[in-house]
Amino acid sequence: MTNYQFLQTFEFKNGIKIKNRIVIPPMTECSSFEDGNVTKNELDYFALRTGGAGIFITPASNVSSLGKGFEGQLSCASDDMLPSLTQVANTIKVNGTKAILQLHHAGRISGSKILRGQQAVGPSAVASLRPGSEIPRELTNEEILQIISDFGQATRRAIEAGFDGIELHGAKTYLIQQFFSPHSNRRSDDWGGSLKKRMKFPLAVVEQVHKIVERYADRPFIIGYRISPEEIETPGIRLADTLALIDVLKKQPIDYLHISTRDVWQTSKNDSDDQIPVVDQIKEHTKNEVPLIAVGNIAKPEEAEKVIEDGFNFVALGREMLREPQWVEKVQNGQEAGINYSLNETDLKQLRITPPLWKFLTKKIHSKLTAD
């Protein structure tokens, strides 16, 4: 079957046409050099997977040195990274696939070991509830303004490196989300407190990035925003908070909203009486004012098609693109029976999965099994 809706084209309001609705989402692969430059193994990993999907979003790239969140992270923190970023963009932009650089600051989800002795920073001096978390240092007003500028300069680098757009990582409890969260943001100044004040940092980053695109881009350029709908912490972000933020975000100069969920059809983490999938509630709330990317535990063509049939503009395949780099091509060529849905250690070399990535994957699998 080759008449799936997810194989149809999509055109953003800025005129950029996407050849199909399949997205490779940002996936941590821990394979860059210590200084944040891309490695050949990492480029090989990208090259094997690109060319089929309409959009390929890079792993999270830190916008400043204190924004680094894990070992082996790709960096966009200085102009020294431009040759590396250009290699990434050129490698991904094959056969019409659009290359998006995800911009990231870890905030308190980092630590002195990763930061080589420096203390992690955050909106407030409140540690994450993750095991082993350290108490971050509260950012000053001047430092906040500098980080906003850092996101802008990283956007300029993405433009100069040849990317087709950037995605702001406002999800998974990293810094942009930390400012929005009442758990991590206990400030009493203009950057925290009320719901409106907790929106100020995310919106300032969007505004700065847009200014840089207007100033430097000599071509249409995509601005995306990734968001996590809920937190389980108390106090923490609830779906009503996220819908309020989306009401404001959808009127900002962003081209898409990427809804980060573990399972695309999951219901509320905090309200067991609410049985409507979170993504559907967001979709109904946006009223088609901003294109949406849905993601989470999608592997088979019929599962991807259901997402598009439900009214979403794009569907992202994460783990499945690790197991089956030629997923799109096999669907297009009527070879669905040949799609691989499993990942074995014997396949790692063929799949260009590096030892750091395999270590990360097995750690995540173990953590999930333990949690279950």
Image (tube, rainbow, N blue to C red):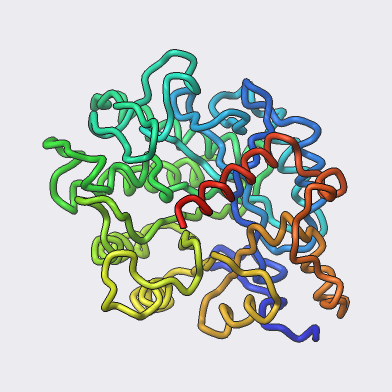
| Left or right for 45, reference 302 | right
Is 135 rendered above or below residue 99?
Answer: above
Q: Nearer the viewer, residue 289 or 139?
A: 139
Q: Residue furthest top?
A: 117
Instruction: Residue 349 in the image: state x and y as whole percent.
Output: 85, 43
List x then y, in percent, for residue 321. Answer: 72, 59
Q: Quadrant of the N terminus?
A: bottom right
Residue 255 lies, in percent from the top left, at 49, 61
**Residue at the image position 65 percent from the left and 71 percent from the top:** 21
Residue in view at x 31 percent, y 32 percent: 122
Q: Is residue 124 left or right of residue 150?
A: left
Q: Is residue 260 above or below residue 285?
A: above
Query: Where's residue 370, x and y in %?
Result: 49, 50
- Kindly indicate the quadrant of the structure image that contains residue 89: top right
Image check: 245 left or right of 193? right
Residue shown at 75%/62% (left/top)?
342
